[in-house]
Image (cartoon, rainbow, N blue to C red):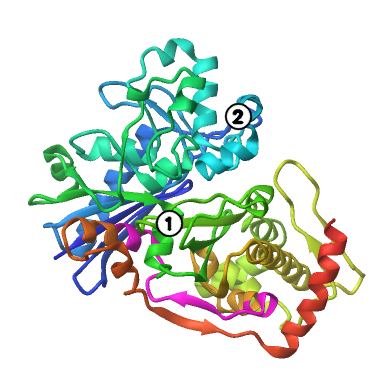
Amino acid sequence: MYLMGIDVGTTQTKAAVFDENWSMKGYAASPNEILRSKDGFAEQDAERVFQTVLSVVREAVGRSGVRNLEAVGLSVQGDAFIPVDKNRRALALAQLGMDYRAGEETDELSGRFGAETMFKKTGMPPHPMNTLCKILWFKKHCPALDERVWKYMTYADFLLSKLGAEEPVIDRSMASRTMALSLETGQWDDDLFQYGALPRERFCAPAEPGTTVGTLSKRICEETGITGRALLTAGGHDQTCAALGAGLFEEGIALDSHGTAEVLSSVLQKSNLSRRFFENGFPCYRHVIPKQYFTFALNHTGGLPFQWVHDQFASQEAAEAKASGRDTYDVILEKMPVQPTNLIAIPFPSGGAKGSVHGLTFSTTRHEFAKAILEATAMELRKNLLLLCAAGVKIQELRCVGGGAKSGIGLQLKADILGLPVATMKIREAACLGAAELAGVGVGAFETAAQAARLAETAKVFYPEQQRAAQYAEKYAEYIEISK
């Protein structure tokens, strides 16, 4: 039996083929373009992303040598909005989660229902990133296009519809992120639809992740080289799929997904709609595992400060890496001092605020500077971890996926700063794996998604070094004081 997981992220689309022993037989990835036409806007050509999906599926199938797939599952980026016509084509560019143009609509919605009431109703703190706010903006500013809309979609229902779903459906983890779904009932909230004059029929029916929703269309199979009758299953939000692939099915383990942004996420056995969650902006939405919930803390600029160091200060390391056939980031990391630096960096936050570095002297090297930036990113991770714990989330172990999971040096630094064991996974493409596991639920390979999550295996665990951990505990207090 062969299963495929497709992961459609904001900046990259990936596909992987797994066999019955959960070995990856074929893998492919391709970038997605982000379009920024004006301040606050972040868009994407959803039709081009769909073509990228077909491309990576075709490449992964070709590399695997396997053409007869049993089922396909989807992991998708959260909070994007795509208006779609009856031919299942996008009527406009997708508004991405990082598109914040709907600030006025968010304020109006909060004014009508109350921000905390909205949170208790949907589990989502009101924010311009939420899909419902984007829909309200579209309806107000694009009335002619709105008249042509068949369905308001996210990438979850859009891609399922394009791939062959019999009826337009959205998985409940993604529906729960729109801020239009009742967290309690798992159904669309009519009060919100009535407020926005939004026809209920324009929203796709919510389905449990792992539900079979159709088969890959004949045309899609021909274009991608797939033979047989590959079932299509409802998948989930990429963070929840990555958590499933990393084995998060009970409290106590958190997932660090480190890329352009850094997301610290955790499973909740019951919903948490406390004031602390609301004040910190922590969502509480449905996990891909039924009867479980999910939350995360977000550092919007996660990997960007270190990328800036790479781009601005690492020409020498880049030349060395090119000469030796290595990655420039690896060369930078290896040249950084082992011990904590005497610097405290405040990384560039989102929203146009300024970053800074404290403690610079004429003897400061660029490798110390680079480490200070990396330390600051881990300090932000520690801050988010402590906020989650104070809000009632249990975290005793961290599992890492994404680009930040590549470096043992970076992972040891996180362990030292967090004071927790930090583990890597045998399959680092956890979102692809989680999506494939949901496909496995759809074909009966697993009774439940929780059963699938138990298969996750860690590759290596990094433990805090006692002396450095104590130094970083003192340094964290300084970091918090300076960053106020």
Residue sitting at x 64%, y 36%: 115
Amino acid type at image mark 1: Thr
Residue sitting at x 14%, y 57%: 70
CA distance for labels 1 and 2: 28 Å
Dot 2 alpha-carbon crowd within 10 angstroms: few under 14, some 14 to 19, many 20 or more: some
Looking at the image, the residue that sits furthest to the left is: 228
Seen in the picture, residue 122 relative to 435 is either above or below; the reply is above
Looking at the image, the residue that sits furthest to the top is: 144
The image quadrant that residue 293 belongs to is: bottom left
Residue sitting at x 64%, y 24%: 108
Seen in the picture, residue 166 relative to 71 is either above or below; the reply is above
Q: x and y percent of residue 231 in the render? A: 16, 50
Q: Residue 481 magenta-drawn?
A: no
Residue range of the region highlighted in magenta in the rendering? 415-435
The C terminus, quarter of image:
bottom right
The image quadrant that residue 82 belongs to is: top left
Q: x and y percent of residue 367 in the render? A: 74, 72
Q: x and y percent of residue 259 in the render? A: 54, 58
In the image, 172 versus 412, the foreground residue is 172
In the image, 347 versus 479, the foreground residue is 479
User: Which residue carries the number 1 mark?
Assistant: 240
